[in-house]
Every structure is written in structure tokens, then in C-alpha cells.
């Protein structure tokens, strides 16, 4: 495990160290959860414009539940299961991390930001089935995830683990919606 942890540290320091004064506020902006709200609202509006109201409502509820699950469960994993220090708390990286946010909690694996954004991106992309929506959405998720490394709060491994968990939850949300929608379609044609 040590060679992987060492590689993760090296890559994180490189990604975190690739900063510029003009980019700092941009990355801090992408790291803020409240700036995601317009995107979530846009997704809900698009759902109600594209889908019948029952499917749009179910899709919205499943998206909210998936987001809540990734958020709560990644926090639990960080604090009770993995206990991996954030780069800004890692004594081996003391003085090497460009920190743009307050320290916050000690632990960072897996990244809740990455899990939330990738889970939401996958599930809403499936619901809307529009390339013009899906491609920018995944770019946004990648940017949010990279911003967490850039601001000094996560290792690359934290972000990759969070993204994988988010995609898993997003896939489960898709399966759930598919089954519910199939039941709705059967009832409407009967």
C-alpha cells in the first residue's frame, strides 16, 4: 500500500502545485457547494420540461436521495472507516500544500464533492439523454473534483474514490428509476 500512497502524494502535490493567482478564486468558486444550486435547479426544470410530470417528480426525488446518500455516506466513511488524513493535515506534506480553504475536518477519503457531482451527473444525464447536457455536466464534475485537489483539501485518490462511489450510486439510481418508470409505463398502457 505504501507505494500507492507515495504515488498519490506525489501526484497530489504536482496537481495542487500547478496554481496561478488568477486561477485561485476560480477553483475556490468551483469548490463551494452553494454555487451548484443553479445547476441542480436547471436539471429539475429540464426534467419537468422533457418528461411527464410523474417521471420528472420521481426523477427529482431519486436525484435528491442519491445526492443525500453520497453526501452522508462519504462523510461516514471518512470519519469512521478509512480515516485518511487530508493533504493539508498530512505531516509528510507539511509546507508542500497550497491551501486555499480552512482546514476543516481531518479526514478526506472519499471526496464527498466528487461523489455528489459524479453521481448527479450520471443519473441526470440518463434522465435527460441529451449530449448538450451530459458533456458539460461531466466536465463540471471533473472541474469540481480537480478543484478539491487544487485548494488542498483532497488527494487525487480521494477524488478518484469519491467519483467511483458517486458513479456507483448514480448507476443504482438509474436502475431504480428504470424499474419505477417501467412500472409507470405498464400501468399507463394497461
Image (tube, grey):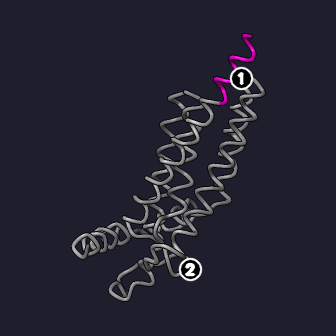
* The magenta segment: 180-190
Q: Quadrant of residue 186?
A: top right
Q: Residues within 10 Å of mark 2 (few under 14, many from 20)?
A: few
Characterize the magenta stretch by its predominant secondary structure: helix
- Depicted 154 relative to depicted 167: above or below: below
1 or 27: which is nearer to us? Answer: 1
97 lies left or right of 148 = left
The disc label shown at residue 170, or none = none
Q: Position of residue 16 (x, y in %)?
A: 38, 70
Q: Which residue is mark 1?
A: 184
In percent of the image, x 68 and y 24: which residue is there? 183
Relative horizontal placement of residue 167, taking residue 156 as reference (left or right)? right
Front tag of 2 and 1: 1
Determine whether the residue tagged by mark 1 lies in a helix, strand or loop.
Answer: helix
Name the mark on residue 105.
Answer: 2
SS type, badge 2: loop
Q: Is residue 74 magenta?
A: no
Q: Which quadrant of the structure image shows residue 9?
A: bottom left
Amino acid at each position: 500500500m505504501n507505494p500507492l500512497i507515495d504515488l498519490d502524494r506525489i501526484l497530489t502535490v504536482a496537481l495542487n502545485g500547478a496554481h496561478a493567482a488568477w486561477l485561485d478564486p476560480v477553483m475556490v468558486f468551483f469548490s463551494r457547494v452553494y454555487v451548484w444550486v443553479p445547476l441542480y435547479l436547471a436539471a429539475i426544470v429540464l426534467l419537468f420540461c422533457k418528461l411527464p410530470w410523474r417521471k420528472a417528480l420521481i426523477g427529482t426525488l431519486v436525484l435528491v436521495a442519491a445526492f443525500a446518500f453520497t453526501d452522508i455516506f462519504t462523510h461516514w466513511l471518512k470519519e469512521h472507516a478509512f480515516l485518511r488524513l487530508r493533504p493539508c493535515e498530512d505531516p509528510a506534506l507539511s509546507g508542500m500544500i497550497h491551501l486555499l480553504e480552512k482546514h476543516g475536518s481531518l479526514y478526506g477519503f472519499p471526496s464527498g464533492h466528487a461523489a455528489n457531482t459524479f453521481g448527479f451527473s450520471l443519473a441526470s444525464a440518463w434522465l435527460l439523454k441529451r449530449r448538450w447536457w451530459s458533456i458539460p455536466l461531466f466536465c463540471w464534475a471533473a472541474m469540481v473534483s480537480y478543484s478539491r485537489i487544487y485548494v488542498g483539501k483532497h488527494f487525487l485518490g480521494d477524488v478518484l474514490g469519491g467519483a467511483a462511489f458517486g458513479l456507483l450510486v448514480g448507476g443504482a439510481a438509474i436502475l431504480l428509476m428504470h424499474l419505477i418508470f417501467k412500472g409507470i409505463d405498464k400501468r399507463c398502457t394497461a
